[in-house]
Amino acid sequence: MENKQIIGLFVHNHPGVLLRVTSLISRRGFNIDSLTVSPAAVEGYSRMTIRISGDDNQVEQFINQMMKIVDVKNVEALPDDNSVASELILVKVKTDGQNNNDILAVTSKYHASLVNLGESTMTFRASGKPGEIDTLVSELREFGIMEMARTGIAALENGDKCLNKDKD
């Protein structure tokens, strides 16, 4: 069964690592739904969070392929039931003035904040689980999405386990 799976990578932080990771992803035919990279808590390392589409076998293959890259120190699947994930979106919706209350009703369900009001647009900021953001986007499409920017997913495993624990 194909699904969207979040993968965490702990990698060396130096030029070329992102290129090596994305090149391998491209060569192997994986589809990236989201990619986020930031410095890790450990000096000299970065944390990558990637959401890919694929079945369980493809996810396992993805993890095995990533571990072959020298600069990748650890890779783990972050399933929904064992991790916390969040994403930020800015979304600009078309309004005719008559549908403002309808748009506000939809956005309030997702705790989205109105951050800008134009003559014919409303811009909102929301954060939440990737599936919640997907649903918000789906519901706003009926009004007409003019533009949107998503940050990508940030995710960590539940409990005390850390992706960067005991890595050199």
Image (cartoon, rainbow, N blue to C red):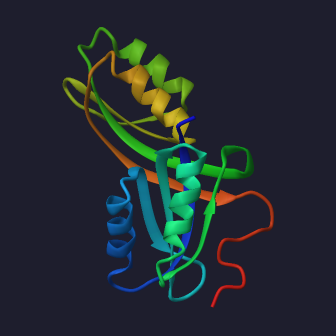
Which of the two residues, 102 or 12, is positioned nearer the viewer here? 12
Position in image of residue 140 (x %, y %): 38, 22
Question: The C terminus lies in which quarter of the figure?
Answer: bottom right
Q: Quadrant of residue 18?
A: bottom left
Q: Is residue 128 visible?
A: no
Name which residue lies at 54% across and 74% down. Answer: 67
Which of the two residues, 123 or 161, is positioned nearer the viewer here? 161
Name which residue lies at 80% across and 61% down. Answer: 159
Name which residue lies at 38% across and 59% down. Answer: 28
* Above or below 100: residue 73: below
In-image side of 149 versus 152 (left or right)? left
Position in image of residue 161 (x %, y %): 77, 68
Residue farthest toward the top in the current orientation of the protein: 98
Q: Is residue 28 visible?
A: yes
* Above or below 35: residue 117: above
Name which residue lies at 60% across and 50% down. Answer: 85
Position in image of residue 29 (x %, y %): 36, 53
